[in-house]
Image: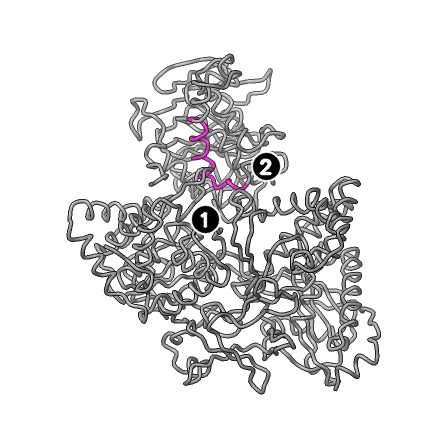
């Protein structure tokens, strides 16, 4: 059967096409038993077909919803394609959700089947099965520990695959019928339902069509010249729209290879071995990477340390200009080349980014310093602004037009306008079909002529690049009337390796104050080197010397804020170091690790009051949820510290006020 | 292509003893160090395929019992029948050859070596090529090494320690070291696995993980397990049968429920003057 790209409008059709045009090129890799196993496009077709024919035997039909829960592994990606080939709709769910959250999504999506990774997920699904009346069959990949379970409605992936292979070998009609099923699919059909983690309220099921994903992926491939020669590593949650686009949709449309790590703990090593050419990560990953390097460098010898800092300073000066192709003095270029040999190259290799051609950071605003750091090493890191509702792309930075403080120009085929309220609106072929079973929310978000409200406040700068300030509803005003953009302040703080998370307060208040979460890796290492004994996170967080260190960081952050005319008013006057790590299990962060500011404000109300009433310390009790769902209480007396503020250059304030 | 091996292949090779038959029979064993009687006339057996716990207060003779079973101590009286063969004295390396592996109360790993090398060390008893071949590290010796490495990778996967494959063991937290030690014992493909306080010094989460692994080893690999443990909750949940020692004597033997209700056991744990 001949296929052409023009008529290819579903991923199952792309699979058939790729098995023809790319044949024995690798489609997927997975490190198992310490060795990278690979599957070619032809083999990938065999696997998907085997699973699809197996799924048919347990009753999967067109229109059924199939939950997919687990870490990034080939078999779960194959279940996307297998489900779609039969006209069923995959509903990936965050694997680290607690049973409670899972129950809501499973039930809301009316999931009939679930393909899950292992016993942990089987247990979770079974524990809430009663509340999900539609759910009939459960399929698991990893058989370990499941031997004694009741297998009436529980199926091993391996078994279904074997059934599928047998059907295909013995029954010529089965294969033909499967192809006919694929042919029935069209671009307008629902491709997948992705539940947004939701910084507020219950998650919403975003329905995306095949057209949404195919067109967005093809546009994205064109924008960055991605073809079958790329390699990427799949390590972000399956339920995140970015992973679905980068590790599935773009791989199928461009034909490139997706590598799955051995386990979530081995990602750094696996990335080093694969050295992806196309890489994406939320700012948090880049932060952690930088933190771990800085921590290791603290332990390095004096000569190495000196060399590292000398060349990094040089990269900071000229690195980005060289990457952008601007004019740089020959002497500086030479020095940069030496630096590349001595420091930047080994550093990139260490991070597994030595082959990276295009890298994206998305999901959240990245601190300008952090962004510039990576670019100065010669890494083509770019920012992308997107949403689940847009099938990712709203804006992206084009090569050569990259600035740390903007998110770039509108992506291909995307129209953007700014509402009077400052909110960013867009219209594109990627705009979602609607929220599943929630017409009211769909109407609130999507206008009749297809414009979608992003909920983010932003503006176009002189070059036509979009700048995002914050969530529209988060941007507030201090008591004095000055602009208060909490995320900006938090990002300034988070650039310090010792600070993992920060939450800024100030809307309607006289001044800005902040909660700070220490980074256990960085601060723990520092404590070890300075012989500071601690028994727990709580003890370390409250240690007087830790407070001193954080105070110097806050001081430095204030200096930086003072230099920004719009931000000078929101320098941090008081702060505290939180006694517990903010955690998604406690609802303090979303599953994509974004701070849920209003929830935190409510939960730690007494601490916020203490920030503003001048007290020196405050006692607080907090309920915590452990991974297995049990609850406990931690108590702490948290110290509150004053910070120094700096004068802003006065004429700049006047300029900004105009 | 399918890289996943059939879990049944992981099971230990058959030795003619069916599941549920007596694998190890300890008959009237007594052990004394000078005037101190560590074990007095104890008989107990371990059935193939079960998880057998040995419990008792401190100094009850539990570790001595394990040491007798794997040949580290030779009892003054009594006999030990393992896989139908009677023996009085045996060297620990002979115990390994017979299919008995153990872990220790205080972790006994090669601290400077990686997880991978530690577990590979567990395979050394099964390697057949002589030192000459090993040093050449070509042809048959290399093939053998690859075969063994495959088994070791299965164990690494099984115990979910891929992320510390290359980490020197000394740098690992205690809970993980215990897991590596279990891995090394498993690498010997034992018929009988002796675990000396596998959960000592662990927090709740680590204990849960370890329990999971012990059950999986027993069920999936079919390994018979005898373990000493202080955490009663763990023992009662894990084991098929429990034997209770106190002052070197056996005071109870039976299923967890039988043992729990036994007055002597309650006395031994709550303390009654002797």
Residue situated in front as seen by the camera: B272 or B102: B102
Residue B216, given in percent of the width and then of the height, sits at 40, 40
In what quadrant of the picture does the C terminus of chain A appear?
bottom right
Is B150 drawn above or below residue B207 in the view shown? above
Q: Is residue B14 above or below residue A249?
A: above
The residues tagged by marks 2 and 1 sit, at their Cα atoms, a distance apart of 22 Å
What scheme was used to colour the molecule? one colour
Location of residue B149 with respect to A386 vertically, above or below: above
Give A517 or A22, whichever is nearer the viewer.
A22
Task: State whether residue A602 appears in this view.
Answer: no
Q: Is residue A62 left or right of residue B216?
A: left
Q: Residue at x 44, y 52 (%)?
A: A72
Q: Any magenta on residue A126?
A: no
In the depicted structure, whether residue A32 falls above or below residue A483: above
Would you identify the image quadrant in which residue B171 lies?
A: top right
Instruction: Say which chain tag 2 marks.
Output: B
Instruction: Tell me, yes or no, whether the highlighted magenta stretch contains residue B157.
Output: yes
Report the span colored magenta: B147-163
Residue wearing tag 1: A260
The numbered disc on residue B167 is 2
């Amino acid at each position: 059967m001949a296929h052409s790209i023009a008529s290819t409008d579903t991923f199952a059709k792309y699979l058939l096409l790729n098995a023809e045009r790319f044949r024995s090129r690798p489609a997927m890799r997975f490190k198992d038993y310490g060795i990278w196993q690979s599957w070619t496009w032809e083999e990938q077709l065999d696997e998907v077909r085997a699973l699809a024919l197996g799924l048919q035997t347990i009753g999967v039909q067109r229109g059924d919803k199939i939950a997919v829960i687990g870490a990034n592994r080939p078999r779960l990606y194959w279940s996307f394609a297998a489900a779609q080939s039969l006209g069923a709709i995959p509903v990936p769910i965050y694997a680290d959700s607690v049973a409670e959250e899972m129950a809501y999504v499973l039930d809301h999506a009316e999931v009939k089947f679930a393909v899950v990774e292992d016993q942990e997920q089987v247990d979770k699904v079974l524990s809430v099965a009663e509340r999900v009346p539609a759910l009939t069959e459960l399929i698991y990949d990893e058989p370990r520990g499941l031997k004694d379970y009741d297998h009436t409605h529980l199926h091993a992936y391996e078994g279904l695959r074997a059934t599928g292979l047998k059907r295909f070998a013995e029954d010529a009609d089965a294969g033909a019928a499967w192809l006919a099923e694929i042919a029935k699919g069209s671009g307008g059909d629902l491709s997948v339902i992705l539940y947004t983690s939701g910084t507020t309220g219950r998650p919403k099921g975003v329905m995306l069509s095949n057209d949404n994903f195919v067109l967005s992926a093809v546009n994205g491939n064109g924008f960055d010249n991605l073809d079958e020669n790329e390699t990427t590593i799949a390590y972000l949650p399956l339920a995140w729209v970015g992973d679905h686009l980068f590790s599935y949709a773009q791989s199928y449309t461009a034909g490139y290879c997706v590598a799955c790590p051995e386990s979530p703990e081995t990602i750094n090593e696996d990335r080093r071995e694969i050295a992806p050419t196309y890489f994406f990560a939320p700012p948090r990953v880049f932060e952690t990477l930088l933190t771990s390097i800085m921590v290791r460098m603290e332990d390095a010898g004096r000569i190495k340390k000196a060399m590292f800092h000398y060349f990094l300073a040089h990269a900071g000066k000229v690195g980005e200009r060289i990457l952008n192709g601007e004019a740089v003095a020959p002497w500086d270029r030479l020095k940069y080349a030496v630096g590349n040999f001595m420091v930047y190259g080994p550093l990139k290799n260490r991070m597994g980014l030595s082959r990276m051609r295009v890298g994206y950071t998305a999901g959240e605003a990245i601190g300008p310093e952090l962004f510039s750091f990576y670019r100065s090493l010669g890494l083509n890191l770019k920012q992308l602004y997107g949403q689940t509702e847009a099938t990712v792309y709203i804006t992206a930075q084009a090569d050569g037009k990259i600035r740390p403080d903007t998110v770039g120009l509108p992506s291909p085929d995307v129209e953007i306008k700014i509402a009077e309220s400052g909110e960013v609106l867009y219209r594109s072929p990627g705009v979602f079909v609607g929220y599943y079973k929630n017409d009211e929310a769909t109407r609130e978000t999507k206008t009749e002529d297809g414009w979608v409200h992003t909920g983010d406040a932003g503006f176009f700068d002189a070059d036509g690049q979009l700048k995002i300030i914050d969530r529209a509803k988060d941007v507030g005003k201090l008591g004095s009337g000055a602009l208060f953009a909490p995320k900006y302040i938090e990002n300034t703080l988070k650039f310090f390796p010792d600070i993992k998370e920060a939450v800024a307060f100030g809307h309607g208040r006289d001044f800005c104050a902040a909660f700070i979460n220490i980074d256990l890796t960085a601060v723990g290492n520092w404590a070890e080197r300075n012989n500071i004994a601690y028994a727990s996170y709580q003890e370390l967080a409250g240690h007087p010397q830790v407070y001193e260190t954080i105070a110097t960081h806050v001081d430095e952050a204030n200096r930086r804020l003072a230099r920004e005319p719009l931000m000078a008013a929101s320098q941090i006057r008081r702060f505290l170091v939180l006694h517990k790590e903010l955690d998604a299990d406690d609802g303090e962060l979303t599953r994509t690790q974004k701070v849920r500011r209003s929830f935190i404000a409510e939960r730690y109300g007494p601490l916020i009051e203490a920030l503003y009433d001048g007290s020196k310390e405050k006692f607080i009790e907090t309920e915590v949820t452990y991974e297995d769902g049990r609850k406990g209480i931690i108590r702490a007396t948290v110290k509150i510290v004053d910070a120094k503020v700096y004068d802003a250059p006065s004429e700049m304030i006047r300029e900004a006020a105009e | 292509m399918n890289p996943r091996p059939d879990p049944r292949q992981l099971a230990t090779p058959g030795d003619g003893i069916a599941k549920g038959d007596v694998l190890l029979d300890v008959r009237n064993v007594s052990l004394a160090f000078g005037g101190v009687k560590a074990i007095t006339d104890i008989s107990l057996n371990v059935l193939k395929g079960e998880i057998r716990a040995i419990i008792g207060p401190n100094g009850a003779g539990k570790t001595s019992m394990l040491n007798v079973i794997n040949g580290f101590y030779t009892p003054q009286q009594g006999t030990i029948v393992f896989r139908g063969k009677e023996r009085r004295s045996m060297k620990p390396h002979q115990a390994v050859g017979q299919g008995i592996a153990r872990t220790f109360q205080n972790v006994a790993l090669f601290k400077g070596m990686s997880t991978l090398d530690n577990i590979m060390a567990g395979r050394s008893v099964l390697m057949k090529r002589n030192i000459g071949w090993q040093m050449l590290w070509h042809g048959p010796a290399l093939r053998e090494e690859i075969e063994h490495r495959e088994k070791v990778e299965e164990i690494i996967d099984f115990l979910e320690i891929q992320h510390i494959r290359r980490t020197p063991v000394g740098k690992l937290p205690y809970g993980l070291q215990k897991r590596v030690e279990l891995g090394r014992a498993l690498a010997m493909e034992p018929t009988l696995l002796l675990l000396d306080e596998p959960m000592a010094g662990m927090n709740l989460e680590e204990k849960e993980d370890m329990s999971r692994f012990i059950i999986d080893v027993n069920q999936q690999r079919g390994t018979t397990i005898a373990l000493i443990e202080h955490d009663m909750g763990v023992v009662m949940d894990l084991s098929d049968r429990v034997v209770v020692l106190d002052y070197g004597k056996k005071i109870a033997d039976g299923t967890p429920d039988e043992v729990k209700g036994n007055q002597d056991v309650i006395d031994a744990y709550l303390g009654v003057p002797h």
